[in-house]
Amino acid sequence: MKFSWQIADGMSYLSSKSIIHRDLAARNVLVGARETCKVTDFGMARDVQEENIYEKKSKGRLPVKWTAYEALLYGKYTTKSDVWSYGVVLYEIFTIGGSPYPRMDGRKIANLLQEGYKMPKPQHVDEELS
């Protein structure tokens, strides 16, 4: 829970500065002294001060399993896109490093999401957290 809160706090700060991270994943969170989490890797981040939206116009690799549905389908990112990624990070945390969309081909995820697919709740997670 402590990690979840710290990551949310960091992402809230970025959102308050109109910055979209676009690559939030457990692999981009460092854990340091006294179990302090820091969000890192801003290579895909974008400043959206003007319009609060970023539209991807070029081809490029995406972290599909962490990318928001609207970004996968339409190439549109907002700070809310990072909220989707945060949900996937929670899955990683509460499965103690589990891979999101286990045993699924990343190229099929957008279609599955379009059909309404949702990852199942990890077995050991209480219903109140789902």
Image (cartoon, helix red, strand yellow):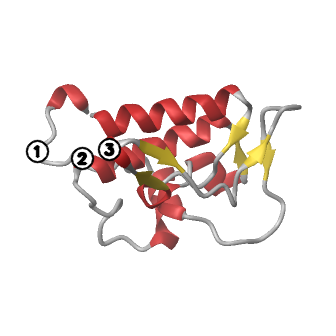
Compute the Cα span from label 2 to label 3.
16 Å
Q: Dot 3, how many residues are within 10 Å of its Cα: few (below 14), some (14-19), or many (20+)?
A: few
Position in image of residue 15 (x %, y %): 65, 31
Label 2 crowding class (10 Å Cα cut-off): few <14, some 14-19, many 20+?
some
Give the class, few, some or many, for how many residues have Cα within 10 Å of label 1's Cα (few <14, many ≥20): few
Q: Please, what is the three-letter code of the amino acid marked with disc 2?
A: Phe
Amino acid type indicated by mark 3: Glu
Label 1 vs 3, first from the N-terminus: 3
Q: N-terminal of the two: label 2 or label 3?
A: 3
Q: Secondary structure at mark 1?
A: loop
Q: Which mark is residue 6?
A: none
Q: Check disc 2 and report the residue beneath it.
A: 94
Residue on which the image places disc 1: 124
Say whether disc 1 or disc 2 marks the residue closer to the N-terminus.
2
Q: Secondary structure at mark 3?
A: helix
Kindly identify the residue that appears in the image at 31 percent across and 41 percent down: 34
The answer to whether residue 54 is seen in the rendering is yes
State which quarter of the image contains the N terminus. top left
Determine which of the numbered discs, if any, sits on residue 35 in the image: 3
